[in-house]
Image (cartoon, coloured by chain):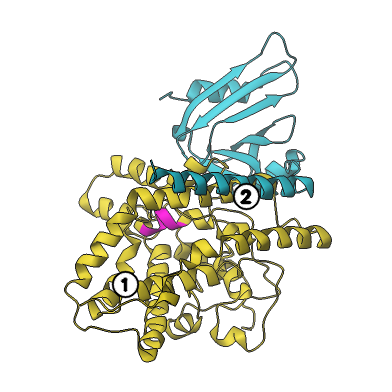
Amino acid sequence: MTGIMPVLTFLGGSLAAVAVMVGLAAALGFWASPQIAGEADVRRLGEPYGGARHVAIDSSGNCALALLGDGRLLIARAMGNRIATRVLPLSAVAALRVDRPPQHAGIAVSLRVRDFSFPALQLHLAGNTVPDWLNGLKDGVRPS
Amino acid sequence: MTPVTPEWAKVDLVTASIPLMVLLVILEMFLARHKGSRSYEVKDTAASLMMAVGLPLAAILTGWVGVAAGLAVYQHRLFDIGWTWWALILCFFAKDFTYYWMHRFCHESRFWWASHVVHHSSQHFNISTAMRQDWTFAFSMIFVNLMPMLFLGFPPAMIALFTGITGVYQVWIHTEHIGKLGPFEWFMNTPSHHRVHHATNPRYLDSNHGGFLIIWDRMFGTFVAERDDDPARFGIVSNLGTFNPLRIAFHEWVAIGRDLAGARSLHEVAGYVFGPPGWSPDGSRDTSASLRQKWRETSTPAPAE
């Protein structure tokens, strides 16, 4: 018991210090703003890979998905003040769901890739019609 | 016989410096706010600091491996080096030299990078980034850099002292708010040199591995000076899409596991584990060397600084 107490005290103190520093960062206004402002942003990200044929952007600007000219996918997520991206073959997609929730307007897209450093993307798309290319993509994914 | 450790050398420098580190983070946040800089971001800061909270727990759970290995080597030491002034000077340089090489391996071989990538995974560069440390240092056996010194006979407590000094020294150099420091840039590791080290710009990749001193990079060809016309872009080549500390801590190990599951030969196993980060059998992924090569092919030569 005496051996574990200093560790718990140290841990508690550390968590309290973290809370103070993170709270201060929040109070000072260090909140990130969404970085994906529009289709042009995503197309620019796709330029080195032959350009984006089709683009889908989350309505809050948090993440985006694009089908590239060479058949690969570009996924993008606003992280902090920047955008983190991955360019992947379709075989790297573990799951893709496209739903039209009855209680909400718009389309919900969930895409999970086989990359532990890039958790599933959740996109909410405006409109009520699922784009053909997204349906086509869904058909091409082999779930794991 | 193990030499007696003087009282003044028994202080745990890293633990004793925690209040100072917290103060530096707070001061830097106010400075960033004052300058209108976006060098901090709430979720990123929280992730970095949670990695720091997990570090002592990882040390308690796994650190004994390094301690046991170190003491075993020390049993077979060549010399009995005591706490003399010349031993302290020699130990400082030897520790900084071995730190340079270990740190360099951490960038040039994926097995060690899998641990060290954690420290580079923030897209920001501030004092809290200094605290974003890996939890798998014992698994990747980063402690092996201390073994030659223990074998020579430097007292373990003396090596621990200089390990602490190097660690604490490097906290303040994680900042965008301090420019170049005149003649200190020639031999010390400074904020400017360390910005280069944390940058993903092709010209800066895998450079400036020094701990306290930058002389080792100058001697062994890994020194790159910061340039005003190429501001550092911080992070890693494939930036993380998460602030989850568990994903930050283990993502590269998981990636190694996935690659090994698909490996078709011993050559591929060795390449995936010990090759440079980004190695692939068909060369389809980017390594630091291939990124630099592509950059050289597409950029106009600029005069060296």
At which x and y percent is residue B95?
39, 77
Image height check: is A15 above or below B103? above
Q: Which residue is mark 1?
A: B156
Q: Residue furthest front?
A: A2
- Quarter of the image that includes the C terminus of chain B: bottom right
Cα–Cα span, label 1 and label 2? 31 Å
Image location of residue B202, percent across then percent down = 56, 66
Q: Which residue is mark 2?
A: A17
Q: Can you give x and y, in whole percent of width and height, for residue B288 in the image?
A: 47, 63
Disc 1 + disc 2, Cβ < 8 Å: no
Secondary structure at numbered mark 1: helix
Residue B172 against residue B250 in the figure, above or below? below
Q: Specify the quadrant of the image occupied by residue B85.
A: bottom left
- Corner quadrant of residue B163: bottom left
Q: Residues within 10 Å of mark 1 (few under 14, many from 20)?
A: some
Left or right for B201, reference B275: right
Amino acid under disc 2 = Ala
Name the residue rendered at 69%, 66% in the picture.
Answer: B176
Find numbered disc 2 in the image and state the secondary structure of the residue it sits on.
helix
Q: Which chain is cyan?
A: A
Q: Which chain is yellow?
A: B
| Residue at 56% across, 20% down | A97
User: Which percent across, then down, holds residue B244?
Assistant: 54, 40
